[in-house]
Image: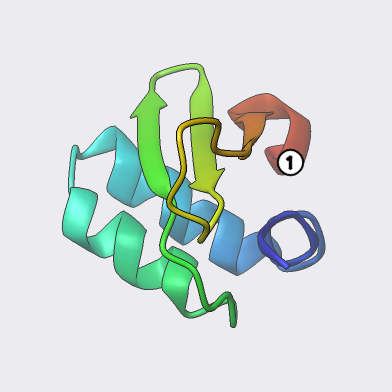
Amino acid sequence: MILNKITTDREFARQVMTAARESDYQEVERLIMRTGITRRPKIWFNPDGIRFEFESLIEQEHKSHLSLAVKWQKFMA
């Protein structure tokens, strides 16, 4: 859902990138949650791109992780 929104909605991608470049974590998180996802990811961003990490809901020693990294120029081109 996140990747689809970022790659198909240029205005949304611009808003996320702008908020990240301004180090506005709350706005980045708000925008990402607006994509319709139900699980809040950990979010990291820097001048090169943004990264999301999702953890499984199962609380056990060996959790599952899903990471998604996107470079700004890839979805703003």
Q: Residue at x 51, y 46 (%)?
A: 55
26 in relation to 49, above or below: below
Task: State how the image is colored.
Answer: rainbow
The picture places residue 35, in percent across and down from the top left corner, at 58, 76
Numbered disc 1: secondary structure: helix
- The one of 10 and 28 positioned closer to us in this rendering: 28
Q: Is residue 61 left or right of residue 69?
A: left
Looking at this view, is 59 or 66 the one in front? 59
**Quarter of the picture holding the N terminus:** bottom right
- Front residue of this view, candidates 1 and 17: 1
Identity of the amino acid at label 1? Phe
Q: Residue at x 69, y 41 (%)?
A: 76
Q: In the rendering, at what x and y percent does residue 8 appear?
A: 81, 64
Residue for point 73% across, 41% down: 75
Q: Quadrant of the C terminus?
A: top right
Quadrant assignment, res 20: top left
Q: Circle 1 sits on which residue?
A: 75
Extreme-front residue of the structure: 60
Pick the front one: 45 or 38: 38
Q: Residue visible at 20% across and 39% down?
A: 22
Q: Is residue 55 found left or right of 1 in the rendered image? A: left
Q: Tell me: residue 19, above or below residue 27.
A: above
Q: Tell me residue 63's x, y (percent).
A: 54, 38
Q: Quadrant of residue 74?
A: top right
Q: Residue 52 at x, y = what percent?
A: 51, 40
